Image: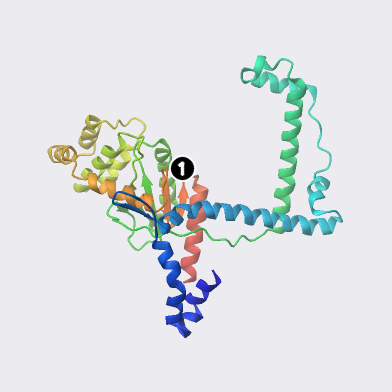
Amino acid sequence: MNRLNGCTRATWKLAGALCVWLLAPMLVQAAEPVAKVGSWVLTLEEVDRALAAKIHEMRENKVREMVLEQILTIKGAEEKVPADQVVEKLMGKVPEPTAAEVKAFIEKNKDQLPNNGEGLDEQIKEHLSDEARKDAEGKVLAKLLQQYAPEILLKAPRFTVTGPEDLAKGESKAPVTIVEFSDFECPYCRRAQAVLKKVQEAYGNKVRFVFRHYPLPFHTKAPKASEAAQCAADQGKFWPMHDLLFEDKSGLEVADLKKAAKTVGLDQAAFDACLDSGKHGARVTADLTEGKKLGVTGTPTFFINGVRVVGAQPFEKFKSVIDDELKEKEKK
């Protein structure tokens, strides 16, 4: 890593040829095939790209773990106890659950307990005691993190998303672009639409949205639904069709898709001919292929200026990434 950093900075200016020589083995290795099936070739670069998010998650967890260890060491010195005894000292004695609390737990959860919880008083008491300790420990750690306010500087990996951006809305020069790989049959993708609407309302022309198709293999209706959305795009009505297909009561059978075309005011004959011909099947497949290269394994997956966000996340998650991106843009 140090060698690569040097090459991208001062060393490049001083000895460009040397840098090329140093980096060549890395570049060859990245493009090196690691698997083949017929004409399909998998490179090490594609594998690393698919693992990037997982590696970042592992790094992030380790960073937080090591930061917490350092905080406990500092606090231990202040309290004159070993670091591994800090939480115990600050937590104090955790009250044991009472017989009434045990009884109340059994009554509330008896349908899920063996023999309706009869004879399980001691086990339930032990369970409640463990939960109480975990809760108390969590509160102590949260307070320590608030007190020392560590600054986490680790950055999420950034991906370059290529391919068409014709299915877009928002200002073309918006400082933040959100690319969504989505599936019309996916309930989590449907759930995410409300959050995306909230993002649009909160940030206005600061955010541009781009849709990419990613029908999952076990969603058998999704590929044709994606084609239908593309057929609607031919008539300039992708987003109305997009919104309708994500409605809870919207069916995704071919007959439903044709009915949806009528609802959004499309030329029915042209839409039907487009859908029946499979005209946009290749486009849907191309989006799917690009998503796989980016390591997309589930939907929805978003790339916010290249920063990956996976799943139907709450508004606060999007806000955190978008605000960071806007701050970075302001610095430039």
Determine which quarter of the picture holds residue 281: top left
The residue positioned 48% from the left and 68% from the top of the image is 330
Asked whether 139 or 23 is in front, the reply is 23
Determine which quarter of the picture holds residue 188: top left
Q: Is residue 197 left or right of residue 270?
A: right
The residue positioned 46% from the left and 44% from the top of the image is 311
Q: Secondary structure at mark 1?
A: loop
Whether residue 125 is situated above or below residue 15 in the rendered picture: above
Q: Is residue 271 left or right of residue 60?
A: left
Can residue 175 be seen here?
no
- The image position of residue 86, as x and y in percent, is 80, 50
- The image position of residue 114, as x and y in percent, is 65, 17
Whether residue 326 is situated above or below residue 36 in the rendered picture: below
Asked whether 131 or 284 is in front, the reply is 284
Q: Residue furthest right?
A: 80
Asked whether 58 or 205 is in front, the reply is 58
Whether residue 205 is situated above or below residue 283 in the rendered picture: below
The tally of labels here is 1
Residue, disc 1 = 312
The residue positioned 36% from the left and 39% from the top of the image is 216
Can residue 296 be seen here?
yes
The residue positioned 73% from the left and 19% from the top of the image is 120
Q: Residue furthest bottom?
A: 14
Residue kind at label 1, given as amino acid type = Ala
**Which image quadrant: the N terminus?**
bottom right
Q: How is the image coloured?
A: rainbow
- The image position of residue 278, as x and y in percent, is 19, 41
- The image position of residue 27, as x and y in percent, is 42, 67
Q: Residues within 10 Å of mark 1 (few under 14, many from 20)?
A: many
